[in-house]
Amino acid sequence: MQTKIKNSVIHVVSLLIDNQYKKLAELSNSRLTAKEIEEAVKDYGETLIMPSDEAFNEIDFLEIENAESKEWSVEFDLWSKESGKTDLTLQLTLTQIDEGELNIELDDIHVL
């Protein structure tokens, strides 16, 4: 399951880096609108970049006890060209919808 979580986070980070805020909001059943996602990134004021594979091996996730489905709460620190690892954190909820797929819900992007 760790690989599926990692791949989901990589996908979300890729969309953020590519400024695909509308696609991210639609894909993720986001609690945030495309405009809110864009504002969170732009207000931070740095250029997001893809971190190393090593950073994705350190994703902080916790399984949520739920009788209906398997869910994970995920936190991941974003990286920027200017600072490297930042204090801008991506928060996701991932829900297993079948054996091969996870539903992505973008809960928040904020400074910790």
Image (cartoon, rainbow, N blue to C red):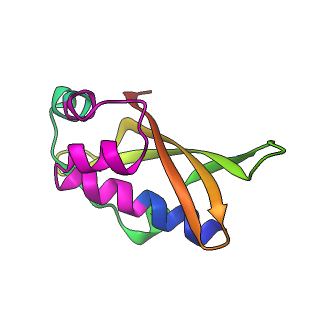
| Residue 43 location, quadrant | top left
Quadrant of the snapshot with the N terminus? bottom right
* As drawn, 89 above or below 100: above
Q: Is residue 53 visible?
A: yes
Q: Determine whether, in the image, residue 81 is placed left or right of residue 69.
A: left
Quadrant of the snapshot with the C terminus? top left
Spot occupied by residue 15 in the image (x, y as percentages of width and height): 26, 55
Q: Please name the residue shown 45% across and 57% down the image.
A: 9
Give the prevailing secondary structure in the magenta stretch: helix
Q: Residue 26 in magenta?
A: yes
Spot occupied by residue 86 in the image (x, y as percentages of width and height): 33, 41
Spot occupied by residue 88 in the image (x, y as percentages of width and height): 35, 35
Which residues are drawn in magenta?
10-38
Q: Residue 97 in magenta?
A: no
Q: Nearer the viewer, residue 59 or 64?
A: 64
Q: Determine whether, in the image, residue 8 is placed left or right of residue 74.
A: left
Q: Determine whether, in the image, residue 36 is placed left or right of residue 58.
A: left
Q: Is residue 58 visible?
A: no
Q: Please name the residue shown 63% across and 67% down the image.
A: 2
Q: Nearer the viewer, residue 10 or 34?
A: 34
Q: Determine whether, in the image, residue 35 is placed left or right of residue 84.
A: left
The total number of labels drawn is: 0
Q: Please name the residue shown 33% across and 46% down the image.
A: 26
Spot occupied by residue 4 in the image (x, y as percentages of width and height): 57, 68
